[in-house]
Image (cartoon, rainbow, N blue to C red):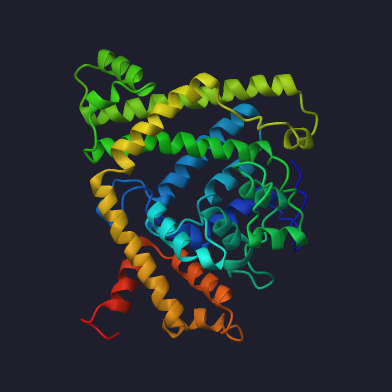
Amino acid sequence: MESRGRLVPEPPSATRTEFQRDRDRIIHSGAFRKLRNKTQVFIENEGDYYRTRLTHSLEVAQIARSAARALGLNEDLTETIALAHDLGHTCFGHAGEAALAEAMKPYGGFNHNEQTFRILTQLEHRYIQFDGLNLTWETLEGIVKHNGPLLDKIPASVAAFNDRYDLELHSFAGPEAQLAALADDIAYNTHDIDDGYRAGFFDFADIQDLPLFGPVLAEVRQQYPLAPMDRVVHEVVRQVIGRMVTDLIDTTRAVLDSLRPQFAADIRHANEAVVRISPAMQDNIKPLREFLTTRMYRHSRVNRACVKAERIVKDIFACLMDKPGCLPEDWQATLQGCEGNATFKARVVADYIAGMTDRFAIQEHRRLFSTETLV
């Protein structure tokens, strides 16, 4: 699979494909490293076992790459999009994003998908020749459209970049991006059951009534009646992932056999996404999401952590908007000549906060507001 190229032309690598180079640039980026200490559901310092944004991204990439091989898609491109899809998430997971989005309402808003794009095209400063990572057209297109075409309310940074390098925002992304998006769903719907069980939010008696998980649990316990419960959980999650992936592969193959695309454009301009799960699997996933929302995402422990997280983010944002001189010096430098532009200042502050890990945000809040120290 050949690439359409990069915004800034570069000579080809002698040893790697263009999509391997994209993947490697993402892995070596500062934003990717910081995912290690960013919340998935549980605040990062609650325990070493629970998933973080980094481990989640790795699990998504593994699922996506395996399915790509079975479907004959480009594995490197699929893996690249999967690894990059969550780079724009803030500290403290969805609570941090909600707080930052509320603070940014007067200044154009905030969402993690646009922030991912900003990181990849502007905010990473590793290369002398360009800002961002100068990724291929296919990778950028896949990341910006992995949830579907952008038909209206196109984020400002995406629209500005698209004027320079047309990503065909009105069409579907290629099949690799569509696959990465479904791999994301499969990963969090299964590993959140694992994390929630180990956190004590629910037990086997609750899981046995869920579609997918209930039947698999019954089979595993019948086959291995003396197995320790922690191993039973792993086995159930493993088998559920396998069934979801098999359903995705079988359903997508049937769609492709019907569509018979000759070119990538046939997939991009189809009436709907071609990488899919079956209606039956969709029916199984809906009650699973409802269960996780009720029993995990809205659990009192999670809610209390979210309240604290939102306060931290809003406090830091308000302080730095009022006193931008408290920003680190390299961030202050980006404001030179634009001091009177409140929207520009807010975007710089949002970029700074969005890049924080959970731990750094807690420390920064303490440095800004604690009276125990003046440094």
- Looking at the image, residue 166 sits to the left or right of residue 206; the answer is right
Residue plotted at (49% across, 68% down): 350
Q: Position of residue 317 (x, y in %)?
A: 42, 71
Q: Position of residue 64 (x, y in %)?
A: 54, 36
- Looking at the image, residue 75 sits to the left or right of residue 215; the answer is right
Q: Considering depth in this image, is 50 or 189 the residue closer to the camera? A: 189
Seen from this angle, which residue lies furthest right?
A: 262
Q: Position of residue 38 (x, y in %)?
A: 39, 56
Residue plotted at (51% across, 42% down): 61
Q: Is residue 112 shown to the viewer in this render?
A: yes
On the rendered image, what quadrant is the C terminus found in?
bottom left
Q: Considering depth in this image, is 155 or 254 the residue closer to the camera? A: 155
Q: Considering depth in this image, is 153 or 24 the residue closer to the camera? A: 153
Is the residue 254 above or below the residue 366 in the image?
above
Q: Position of residue 57 (x, y in %)?
A: 47, 46
Residue plotted at (58% across, 20% down): 250
Residue 256 lies in what quarter of the image?
A: top right
Is the residue 107 above or below the residue 167 in the image?
below
Q: Considering depth in this image, is 94 or 49 the residue closer to the camera? A: 94
